[in-house]
Amino acid sequence: MRSPSILSLLWLTTSVALAQVKPDLYDTDKLSPAFHAGRRAALREKMPPNSVAVFFANPERIRNNDTDYQYAQDPNLYYLTGYLEPNALLVLTKDEVVVNGQKGTEFFFAQERNPQREAWTGRRLGKEGAEKALGLKNVYVGNDFRAFPLDFGHFDKIMGVLPLGAVDTPRDSTDLYSLVEQVKTKTQGHQPMDAQSLRQLMGQLRQVKLPEEMVLLQKAIDISCQGHREVMKFLEPGVTEYHAQSVMEYVFKSNGSEYVGYGSIAGGGENACILHYITNRRTLQNGDVFLADCGAEYHGYTADVTRTMPVNGKFSPEQKTIYELVLAAQEAGFAACQPGAPFRNVHQAAFKVIAGGLFKLGIAKDSAEVRRYFNHGTSHSLGLDVHDLIAPVRPVPAPAVLTASTATTTVAPAYTGPPTFNLMPNFVLTVEPGIYIPANSPCDPKWWNIGVRIEDDVIITETGHRVLSASAPRTVAEVEQVMAEQSEFKKPGKR
């Protein structure tokens, strides 16, 4: 089945069918070409004068031998084009230029069509498909870039982020590795490629979600919340972490999610105290708490939702105490989600509540000990990446106070602190405080192996905020009520 002659025959026998694909049989709710064109226009508006920006597709990743991981496009390239294939390159210029007799500000180099490969791995858009399906202009194939007569020395600023991990395929001069090397050659001796400025500009765009994006992000969040509800109903002593994970991800997949937004965290007992535990092989026991941090990805946008639940359906007094402390901290974090407020306020509000609670319970006596049990931030941005791009800025220092004796020498000191970020309408973030008390912690053993995180996705509005993941049960009463419901999923070992 691997000989070229057989491949050619396969292509000949399937070419008619491939030409008759009906688009309406596939997803009809993807971002439109007009959306992506608008994003390219918005980026050009922000680009500095006489500048050029270069965007690469993500590399393909080998899992083992001749098996690849499922391909995921570079979020910036997807945001600007909607293109989902590897081995591609987008060049955007601030101002109109003439190349090959054609005027334009965008030049796209698509993966070339290959009938033999397509018989094995699926159809490619090629040049014509990128033009027709995505509405891209000045489209070429990768092999055209080597001789492409765009003079990078013409520009005052060249922006781009070189992809990591591109692997050279010696027999393929159009793979991502070759495109990267050709960009290096074409820009050598000119302005150095500026990655930070491009990240800043893309962060400014991506941190404010447009209505079309919110439709997809809300879909991912709704699917995720449904998955959490089903796991609550399914959970009982004797099932494994991976049984619960399988229920969660079945719900994701059956509702159209192409992939998980990140590796599913499904930890019970001592594993609930490991922040990014993804082994998921333990058998759950009576008396365990189970922490599920799982989010569906839908058309590139990912949810991020965490719920913690008692395996036997009822929180013990100690579990309930810690859970309700985390819940109160989350409510404080929600209250801090206000337009114009500093991003850090959300964490500070949640930390203050958890610190006060741990002091009162005798689990911690100072802030350093609180950080032993609450050892992560409360929030991050959310969108095309689970930790999505933002564009923090350094504050402009206030003018120094001048005196008669220093008026000619005193200057404002340079600001050396971390970049800051203020919340703004249509910015989406998580609010996810947690407390994790592993065995052998320096506190009463009755608290050991209690790990609780409650995470919701929130959008900043003109007047406050809205919780996007409110359909997932959150209070003790709600969680226990849903856990008492009958699951539609067969328990392992039961008929």
Image (cartoon, rainbow, N blue to C red):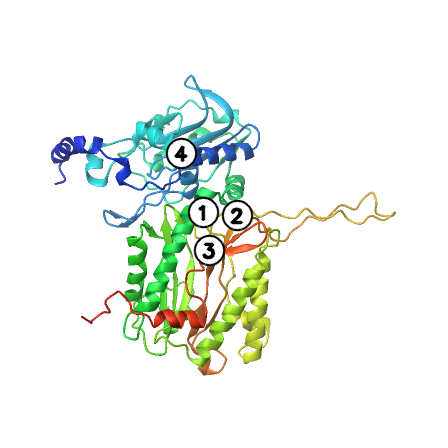
Of pointers 2 and 3, the one earlier in the residue sequence? 2
Residue 214: mark: 1
Residue corresponding to mark 3: 468
Q: Residue at x 44, y 58 (%)?
A: 469
Q: Position of residue 49 (x, y in %)?
A: 57, 29
Pick the front one: 182 or 264: 264
Q: Tag on residue 426?
A: 2
Q: Are marks 1 and 2 in contact (CB under 8 Å)?
A: yes
Q: Report, in whole angstroms, how far the alpha carbon at label 4 lies from the one at label 2.
A: 22 Å
Compare marks 1 and 4 and give the one earlier in the sequence. 4
Horizontal arrangement in the rendering, residue 122 relative to residue 49 (left or right): left
Cα–Cα gap, marks 2 and 3: 12 Å
Mark 1: amino acid: Met
**Badge 1: few (under 14), some or many (20 or more) residues near its Cα, within 10 Å?**
some
Left of 6 or right of it: where is 107? right
| Residue 329, image quadrant | bottom right
Q: Sort mark 2 into few (<14), some (14-19) or many (20+) by Cα contacts within 10 Å.
A: some
Q: Is residue 34 visible?
A: yes
Q: Residue furthest right?
A: 404
**Residue at image mark 4:** 33
